Structure formats: structure tokens, C-alpha cells
Amino acid sequence: MISPALFLFSSFLCHVAVAGRTCPRPDDLPFATVTPLKTSYDPGEQITYFCKPGYVSRGGMRRFTCPLTGIWPINTLRCTARVCPFAGILENGAVRYTTFEYPNTISFSCNNGFFLNGTKSAQCTEEGIWSPNLPVCSPVTCPPPPTPKFAVLSAYEPLAGNRSVYGKQAVFKCLPNYAMFGNDTATCTAHGNWTQLPECREVKCPFPIRPDNGFVNYPAKEALTYKDKATYGCHDTYVLDGPEEVECNKFGNWSAQPSCKASCKVSVKKATVIFEGERVKIQEKFKNGMLHGQKVSFFCKNKEKKCSYTEDAQCIDGTFEVPSCFKEHSSLAFWKTDAWDVKPC
């Protein structure tokens, strides 16, 4: 039979042994909390790890019991961030991000000509969803283009509500007798307005002057205006220098001022020349004179090299100068060889 004194001593030793096996404060786990959290735990007490909002447990146990040894079991639990779904591609825009994990934020931007219809940024929430909802990029629109004074729209394709989207164009034309200054096309810009519109102004030209030795015809009107035309012509033996038809331009001037140029008399009685790529006898081809602007090539001799070369001569408003190198032979000097019949240099 155990004596009361021995029983009390054994109980004391057991109490001392058990008191020395308490478990310490558990290790901190990133993004997790412990319940209950104390500085020490008696054997048999339980603790539970909870992942913080926005994180989920991966691998390992969540609940642990303090053992008699006073040493917590190895904890392999990990709390990892929730991952929001792929944000997708923002049509006509861009998504900027680092990761899609909680609590990261993504931002949005639109291409030129589009605007954000919705939020500029969204955050991955504790529940693993994006908040606020993802935006869309909507096209910038312009109101109907104003029509300049004395102008009409010649091409315009609006949307519903008579508005236009970014990049669309409107084309204008001026009323008759009005000239356009500026670009005839306006474009809907990324700022929702139109590029500079053209201006239509009334333009008048002076009555055209009749050229010497010629005539001019134009509309029988009190005033000649933009786009009106006049036609010119010359009398016999004169050639029109310039276009036959001219037009009143936007600056109040005629597109050209033609004149009548006189023909030339050819003083050479006998010569073979090149005219428009062919050899012709000048006394036959131009017996009635040479018209203004016509050109021929005379044959000249190089006495040292005993060969021939050509020099040009042109009729310029009644004046025709024969090249000084050309030598016209008398019809009596039949023994002399003409330059055109000599081998070229």
C-alpha cells in the first residue's frame, strides 16, 4: 500500500513534467492568421490557421493540436493569392498589367479616335473577380459638319443620328461661280470635331484682251466669273503662242494670255535641212514661209576634219537666223559638194 506522502510526491513530479511540455506561440504564416493566438498552449489545445481574405490555402493541414512533446508539427500550409480570370483583349485599346493576382490592379487605354466607356482601372477583389466591370472602347463621334456659305455637301455618309465616327470624311463643293479656298475634304478628328472647313468665294475675271493679229471669244455676260472660258485664234500666217482655250481661275486671273506670232521668210534659196527627223529641201518645204516655232537643222562643214555637223535654226515671231556656219553655194558652183552630202563627224 502506497503511503499518502509518496502519492503526493509522485503527483508533484507529474505536474512538473506536464507543465514543462507547453507549446510555444505558433510560427507566422504569410497571409494567414491563427485562432486562438496565444504565447503558449497546453498539450491537447488546438489551433486553426485561416488564410486572409483574398488568399486560399494550398497543401498541408489547417488545424493542429499541441502534443505532449510541446513541439508543433511541421506546417506545410501555404496561402496563395486568388487569381482573377484573364482580362481579355480590349478591342481598339490596350490592357496594362503585371499579374492577375489579388490585390493587383489593371489599367485600360483606348487607341486614337476611341474613348473609354467605363472605368480606367479595375482591381482583382478578394472574391477573385474584377471590380468595377471591364470597360469598352467606343469610337469618338462628330456632330454633322457645318456647311460653309455658298457650298454644298457632295459626299457624306453619317451614322444614325446624323453623326460621324472618327476618321470619316465629308466632301464639299462650291456653288457655280464660286471658287474653293482650302481643302474640299473635312475629317472627323479624335477630339470629336471637324478639321478646317473650306471657304467659297465669288470670283470675277477681267474681260480678256484681243491679241494683235488675232481674235478672242468669250461668253456674252455682264461679268466673267470663275470657270468661265475664252477661246483664242490668229489670222492667216500667224501662229497662236499658248493654249487655244483659257479659263478664269480662283485668283481672278486667266490661266494664260495667248498671243499671235508672225511667220518667217526664209532667205536661203537652196539647202537641204532636217525637219521633224526627215531631210527636206528648204526652198520647197517653206516656200510660203516658216511658221512661228518651227525648227530646222542646217548642215555645216568642218573643213579640218572633212566632215559635217548640224546646227539648229528656229522661227521666232517673224525672225529666222541662218547659222553662220552654213554656206549656201551658187547654182553655178556645181563642182562644190554640199555639206549635207558629206559624211557626218
Image (cartoon, grey):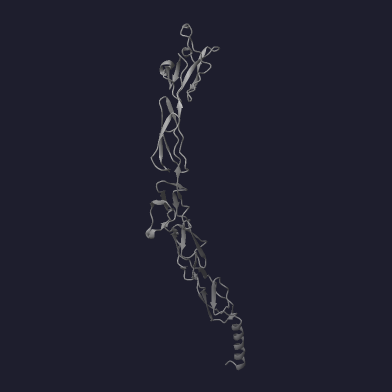
Q: Is residue 145 left or right of residue 14?
A: left
Above or below 246: residue 154:
below
The picture places residue 106, in percent across and down from the top left corner, at 50, 63
Which residue is the extreme one toward the front?
222
Task: Kindly identify the residue that appears in the image at 62 percent across and 84 percent down.
Answer: 16
The picture places residue 173, in percent across and down from the top left corner, at 41, 48
> In front here: 27 or 324?
324
The picture places residue 50, in percent across and down from the top left corner, at 51, 75
Q: Quadrant of the N terminus?
A: bottom right
Task: Kindly identify the residue that appears in the image at 40 percent across and 39 percent down.
Answer: 229
The picture places residue 158, in percent across and down from the top left corner, at 38, 56
Q: Is residue 166 left or right of residue 49?
A: left
> In front here: 329 or 215?
215
> In front here: 118 or 331?
331
Q: Is residue 46 left or right of residue 6?
A: left
- Image label count: 0
Above or below 233: residue 59:
below
Task: Kindly identify the residue that appears in the image at 48 percent across and 17 percent down.
Answer: 298
Task: Kindly identify the residue that appears in the image at 62 percent across and 92 percent down.
Answer: 5
